[in-house]
Image (tube, grey):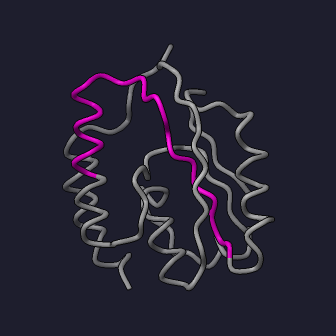
Amino acid sequence: MATLDGTARNIRRSLPDLIAAIENGGERAGLAAGQRVGRKDTGFKKLQSRVANGVRSAILRDGTRDTGCGLKAFRREVFLMMPYFDGLHRFLPALMRREGYDIAYVDVIDRPRHSGVSNYGFFDRLWIGIMILPGCGG
């Protein structure tokens, strides 16, 4: 299974690389997470993301630098074991590690937003995420 971002900012051609990372990782590979390179956001949006990722990473220590990337591939049976909550995509690496699975990281190209608006602001990324954190750790 795989997820994509809704605005086509991340190149879908990266999906085979994510799927290959899962397949090449053996049975312990639960997730292949895209990590955006060359972000095409404003400086303020990048700062918001950096702060939120930094807080999440400091608490969960899951080794993931970019949980906001919409491109992720995972084993269906493993994903179905995960709890469901709004914003799950940002915590999938920590939840996968908590269940004993490995994470593969694949760099993906980020493109500018041509339509729509971000569904997340500073408070969504940081404060709501902080409220979710206790349930995601080991």
Q: Which region of the structure is painted magenta?
A: 29-52
Residue at screen point 54% across, 74% down: 96
- Relative to 38, does residue 65 appear above or below in the rendering? below
Task: Find out whether residue 118 is within the magenta segment.
Answer: no
Q: Is residue 86 visible?
A: no
Query: Foreground: 57 or 123?
Result: 57
Residue 123 can be seen, yes or no: yes
Residue at position x 22%, y 52% in the image: 126
Q: Residue at x 51, y 78 (%)?
A: 97
Task: Specify whether residue 41 is painted magenta.
Answer: yes
Q: State which quadrant residue 90 falls in.
A: bottom left
Image coordinates of residue 11 in percent, x first then y, are 65, 30
Give the quadrant of residue 99. Answer: bottom right
Q: Nearer the viewer, residue 76 or 26?
A: 26
Depicted 20 relative to depicted 29: above or below: above
Residue at 76% across, 55% down: 19
Asked whether 73 or 62 is in front, the reply is 62
